[in-house]
Image: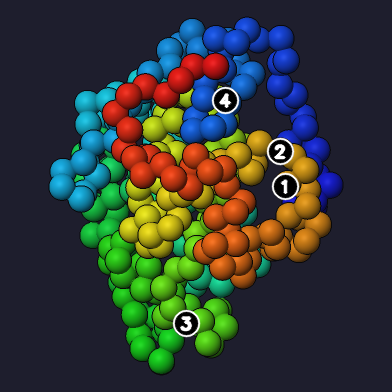
Amino acid sequence: MSPHAESNRRKADPDDDDLPAQTRMRIGETSLNKVKASHLLKCPVSFVPIQMDGDKLVSSSGSKRLIECEVGLSDLQRMTDLFYQKAFLDATLDSFIHSHSEPHGLRFAKWIYQQLTGSCLWDEDCRLRDKTPFPISSNDQHVVFDLASAHIAARGSLKRPKEYRERAFQLDECRVWMRLHFWAMRESGVFVQSPSFADYYVRFIGHYIGVYETQSPLFTRESLRWSADPENIDNYIANGRRMIDVLGLSIEEARQQIPEEERSDTQWPYHTVKESIA
């Protein structure tokens, strides 16, 4: 898709500026503005806390309800397919992806579904997936069979610059990943389809991204805000789909890009009280 066509698609469904304040839900420091009234009537906004068992995130009655009542597997796949379409074009993320022909979007959607419901949907997919080895760095033959092995394959991808292969995920790479993923959530319609899911999911990602890069959760809310401004997306595309405002920054330089209250918030994303309604 050309940059012009993509820009037009984003502008094709303008938001309604006349909705009352009670239809705006704050996610972190970002207002979920101009939510369609029909969606709000169908899906009242509710806060679902992240539930932990030790250091492991687990499903809860609230997260199961989000999937049962508001966002199904097909909605998740619409979001994840859009994410991979963007990742394939991204100068940073595509280097981690061995092949474009794999059903990445469906697998990611199944993983999200399993995490929120406690089902075995993604485990079953892993059991049945192709186990053909493929080369990664150091001429190793690698088989992907679970999440950890998938991330080993990504870090060792032969598409990455040789000096970066097997290197742990970096903060700037995680920020690019989150920005594109939340952009896909907006573009898929899931963001407005279920504000409750969107609120939970941003915190869900905030937890999991920290597993791979410990500073990344601080930047999750900024990553959500990024795609709320069409100018950010236009600039990104104009720069060859490289996020020049984050790539190569030190942690301290990056921290200056987010509000002080987010830099110092040690509880997020594990708050147990409802986010404020704007």
Residue 161: x, y in percent? 57, 83
Instruction: Tell me how far mark 4 sits from mark 1, CA to CA.
Output: 18 Å
Residues tagged 4 and 3 counted as in contact (Cβ below 8 A): no
Q: Nearer the viewer, residue 138 or 22?
A: 22
Q: Which residue is mark 3?
A: 165
Mark linked to residue 233: 1
Vertical relation: 41 (above or below) 215? above
Q: CA distance from mark 4 to mark 3?
A: 38 Å
Residue visible at 42% across and 80% down in the picture: 166
Tell me which numbered mark, 4 or 3, is placed earlier along the sequence: 4
Are dots 1 and 3 in contact, CB under 8 Å?
no
Q: Nearer the N terminus, badge 4 or badge 1?
A: 4
Where is residue 118 shown, x and y percent of the image? 21, 39
Report how far apart the C-alphas of labels 1 and 2 lie in the structure. Answer: 7 Å
Q: Tell me which amino acid carries mark 2.
A: Asp
Which amino acid is tagged 3?
Arg
Q: Secondary structure at mark 3?
A: loop
Decide which of tag 4 and tag 2 comes sooner along the chain: 4
Residue at the spot of label 2: 229
Which of 199/215 is in front?
A: 215
- Residue at 56% x, 68% y: name it: 250
Numbered label attached to residue 32: 4
**Neighbour class for label 1 at 10 Å: few (<14), some, many (≥20)?**
many
